[in-house]
Each structure stands twice: as C-alpha cells, then as structure tokens.
C-alpha cells in the first residue's frame, strides 16, 4: 500500500469512500469516560492540502460531537488523527460470447485486465493517559472522481457517518 497525502486521496476521489468500513477497539477501554478529544498534528500539511485536511477534520468533528465528545485544543481525553492511502488492485474482465464463462476454448472471448485504485481513510483515537490506541476505523472504496467539491464533502460526511455508527463500541446494538 502506497502512503500519500490527503490531497491526493481527496482530489482523486473522496466520493469513493462511502461504502466499505471496518473498525476495531480496545475492549478494556472505558469509552463512557471519554468526554473530550483533540486533533494531533504530527504531520506536515502542505498548503495545497489544507482545505482537504479541514474537510476531513470537520466531518470527523461532526460525528464525534454527535457522540457527545467535545473538541478541545489541549488536554483532551482522546487524541484523534487520520491517515490516507491509495492501493492499486488488478481487475479482470472476460469479454466474449459463445459459451459458458468457464469454457474459454469455445466461442470468442478475451480477458482484459485493468488497474483500479482503492482509497482508504483511517481514523485513530488514542488514549494519552494509557498511551494506547483505543479505537481505529477505516473507510475505503474504489476511487471515483467528482469535480464537485460539495458533492465530495457530502460523500465524505456519509462515509464518516457510516464509520462512526459503531462508536462507541456497542452503540450500534441499540
């Protein structure tokens, strides 16, 4: 998997990050005790990435506020951070006719390969008192470019809503 800047993921297709989500968490963490969070700025944000960085943080902020967490600038109960990446996967398509797909020797058919890009946005929540990751979620999907930044942001919002549906752990069982 190739690590890239947030701009590349968002410019190439935040719109694609709406469907596939997964998460994991520390089963010993007391999620009811977390009331505040702060963003950790441990990476250099290039000037061209600043708007995208703001969009990602705003979409996550909306979800965490809806879960009862308040953003603070210092001394948060949790530290929040994100990473963005793109991986390249091969896709195989059988183009042809004249017989069942498992019998390539009959009729006319050919296999076409293409490379598809899959974007991923990972959000991590760390407990600074325990010095431990307590929750991590990833939203990923095949990249689909949209030239409309408002549409991209709405799609990012939907992806984060789906990702944070299970935060805090056990909340989706209600």
Image: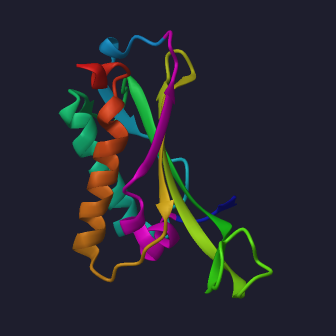
Q: Is residue 126 left or right of residue 156?
A: right
The quadrant the C terminus occupies is top left
Rendered position, 60 above or below 68:
below
What's the coloring here?
rainbow
Residue sitting at the far right: 105
For residue 47, say whether it is visible: no
Q: Is residue 148 magenta?
A: no
What residue sits 20% from the left and 27% below the top? 68
Q: Nearer the viewer, residue 94 or 106?
A: 106
The quadrant the N terminus occupies is bottom right
**Dividing the picture into quarters, in which one does residue 71 lie?**
top left
16 relative position to 171: left or right: right
At a point 30% along the width and 13% down the height, the residue shown is: 32
Q: Is residue 51 above or below residue 158?
A: below
In the rendered image, residue 20, in percent from the top left (x then y), is placed at: 45, 50
> Residue 5: x percent and y percent?
55, 65
Q: Is residue 101 above or below residue 131?
A: below
60 left or right, relative to 118: left
Quarter of the view holding residue 16: bottom left
Task: Give the tally of numbered discs.
Answer: 0
Q: Is residue 11 magenta?
A: yes
Q: Mark yes or no: residue 157 visible.
A: yes
Q: Nearer the viewer, residue 40 or 102?
A: 102
Q: What x and y, as percent, mark residue 130? A: 54, 15
The boundaries of the magenta stretch are 6-28
Q: Give coordinates of residue 27: x percent, y percent.
A: 50, 13
Residue 99, quarter of the rendered image = bottom right
The residue positioned 61% from the left and 85% from the top of the image is 97
């Amino acid at each position: 998997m190739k690590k890239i800047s947030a701009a590349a993921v968002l410019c190439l297709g935040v719109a694609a990050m709406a469907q596939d989500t997964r998460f994991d968490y520390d089963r010993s963490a007391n999620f009811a005790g977390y009331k505040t969070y702060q963003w950790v700025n441990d990476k250099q944000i290039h000037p061209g990435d600043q708007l995208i960085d703001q969009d990602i943080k705003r979409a996550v902020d909306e979800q965490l506020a809806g879960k009862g967490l308040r953003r603070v600038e210092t001394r948060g109960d949790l530290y929040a951070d994100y990473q963005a990446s793109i991986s390249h996967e091969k896709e195989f398509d059988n183009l042809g006719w004249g017989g069942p797909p498992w019998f390539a020797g009959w009729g006319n058919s050919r296999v076409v390969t293409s490379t598809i890009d899959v974007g991923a946005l990972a959000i991590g929540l760390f407990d600074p008192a325990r010095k431990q990751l307590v929750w991590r979620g990833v939203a990923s999907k095949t990249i689909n470019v949209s030239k409309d930044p408002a549409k991209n942001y709405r799609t990012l919002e939907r992806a984060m809503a789906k990702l944070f549906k299970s935060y805090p752990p056990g909340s989706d069982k209600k």
